[in-house]
């Protein structure tokens, strides 16, 4: 099924992970098939990428990009100078 696959490290908040687990449970019950968290996350990513022109998706991307910038900036300020 996945001939050309790549591994990715994905860091999520506990809230997002919990919501994805709930969705996996609901999908398992509705489909009467085992649905893993990995299956749910793959599906959400694929569906999200198909909606690249959506304002909500773009706003979410912007929020995450700004959060990463702030974290990196704070980490640089915390590094000791002089090495």
Image: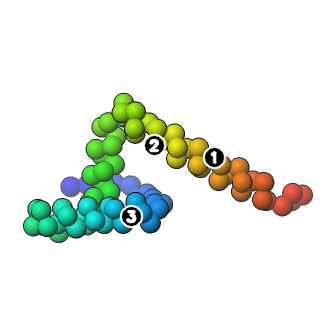
Q: Residue at x 44, y 36 (%)?
A: 58
Q: Nearer the viewer, residue 52 or 83?
A: 52
Residue at which label 3 appears: 17
Residue 15: x %, y % from top left: 42, 63
Residue 41: x %, y % from top left: 32, 57
Q: Nearer the viewer, residue 66 or 46?
A: 66
Classify mark 1: helix, strand or loop.
Answer: helix
Q: Residue at x 45, y 43 (%)?
A: 60
Q: How many marks overall?
A: 3
- First-in-chain label (3 vs 1): 3
Q: Which dot, 1 or 2, sits closer to the camera? A: 2
Classify mark 3: helix, strand or loop.
Answer: helix
Image check: 71 left or right of 48?
Answer: right
The alpha-carbon separation of the residues under discs 3 and 1 comes to: 23 Å
Give the residue at the far top of this rendering: 53
Give the residue at the far left of this rendering: 32
Q: Which mark is residue 69?
A: 1
In the rendered view, would you say 58 is above or below 5? above
Residue 26: x %, y % from top left: 20, 64
Classify mark 2: helix, strand or loop.
Answer: helix
Residue at which label 2 appears: 60
> Which quadrant of the figure has residue 51?
top left
Q: Nearer the viewer, residue 49 or 30?
A: 30
Image quarter where the N terminus lies is: bottom left
Pointer 1 local density, CA inside 10 Å: few below 14, some 14–19, many at least 20 = few
> Which quadrant of the figure has residue 17?
bottom left
């Amino acid at each position: 099924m996945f001939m050309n696959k790549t591994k990715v490290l994905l860091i999520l908040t506990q809230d997002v992970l919990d919501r994805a687990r709930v969705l996996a449970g609901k999908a398992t019950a509705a489909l009467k098939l085992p649905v893993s968290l990995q299956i749910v996350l793959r599906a959400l990513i694929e569906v999200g990428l198909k909606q690249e022109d959506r304002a909500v998706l773009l706003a979410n991307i912007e929020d995450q990009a700004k959060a990463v910038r702030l974290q990196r900036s704070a980490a640089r300020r915390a590094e000791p100078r002089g090495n």
